Amino acid sequence: MKQGKMFMVFLVLVLAMELSVTGIRAEEVSSTVIAETETTTAETAQKPSVKKQSLKKIRVRVKKSDLLSFFKRSAFIGSSIGVGQRMYLDYEGRKYLGSPKMLVKGCYSFSNDNIVGGQYRLTYQGKDYSARDAVAKAKVKYVFINMGTNDLYETPEKVYERYKNYIKGIQKKNPGIRIFIESTTPVFHAGQKGGLNNKNVNRLNKLMEKYCNRNRDLYFIDITTALKDSHGGLAAEYCSDHYVHITMSGYRVWTQKVCAYVKHLLIQEKKAKIAVKYAKKRKIKKEYMRAKRLVGQLEKSTLKTELTKKLKGIKYD
């Protein structure tokens, strides 16, 4: 740097001596050269522009094999309507829907769940069990429950209390289990009897939906709406006996609703996991905000709690 300055001074003196003949003053030459030198230095000293970091794209796919794997680790609980569901799965093929465990029994209800040796109790591998014990024996991670039809001789509020205790029993015996409540299905309009009517079915479903929304690892799947006719009852094409039982086409609609729900859930959870991973790795505000939004969209669950904790530990630039 010093050698460069000395060279510039020498250059000024030489030019001043050479141009003195033409009448140009040394001060003018000196100021011109220095001005040019300062401009060049200022331009050279400019910082290179910093490239803004963009969000990494999140690509998520849920394949058929993912759904089959999910349902393979699942059990379905139900009464005679559940027996019809088992018949539908058998009709579709031996490995249809991953061959879930079917814990179903005709006339099954909350009232007879705890009656040891009762003929309407759930059976698994030839032995009768309460729902909580049957789920434990089946060693599944996910449970789909369709109940209420055989219990609506009582008010929806009383059935709701029974349903809550039933769920809590399964959860206590099976820590970490994820439970999917399939809405109680409607009654054929002309087949309503006493408390088993569509007004009570709708009331019970609303209570259960709110309960699922408030509690962790509980999910409510509305299969009822798709099975209704214009009167709000079980549609004729989906009813096999002008009462409460369902046709094969009805179970097909039911199964499609369940699969669509699970697929959406898996996609949302995968997106949230990846977003948190990116936010933790890249530590930029955009990634953090996206992760926070996607985690916030998840239903109340153990996974949501875990991802929320991870987000709190991330510091972004």
Image: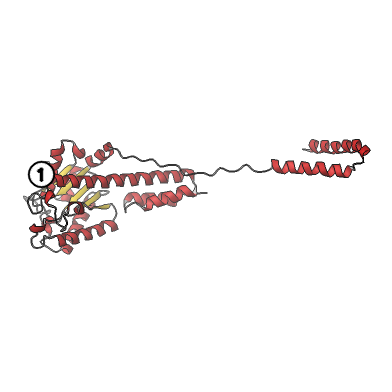
Judge from the rendering whether residue 190 lies leftward or rightward of residue 44; answer left or right: left
Spot occupied by residue 182 in the image (x, y as percentages of width and height): 20, 51
Spot occupied by residue 162 in the image (x, y as percentages of width and height): 17, 59
Residue occupying the far right of the picture: 21
Counting other residues with Cα less than 10 Å from the Cα at mark 1, is it few (<14), some (14-19), or many (20 or more)? few
Identify the residue at image location x=8%, y=58%.
Answer: 190
Residue 142 seen from this side: no
Image coloring type? secondary structure
Judge from the rendering whether residue 162 lies leftward or rightward of residue 66; answer left or right: left
Secondary structure under badge 1?
A: strand
Residue labelled with disc 1: 127
Nearest the viewer among 276 and 232 is 232
User: Within the image, what quadrant is residue 35 found in?
Assistant: top right
Residue 35 seen from this side: yes
Identify the residue at image location x=88%, y=35%.
Answer: 14
Judge from the rendering whether residue 206 lies leftward or rightward of residue 129; answer left or right: right
Judge from the rendering whether residue 299 lies leftward or rightward of residue 189; answer left or right: right
Type of residue at label 1? Lys
Identify the residue at image location x=15%, y=44%.
Answer: 102
Spot occupied by residue 166 in the image (x, y as percentages of width and height): 18, 55
How many circles with numbers are drawn on the protein?
1
Q: Which quadrant is home to the N terminus?
A: top right
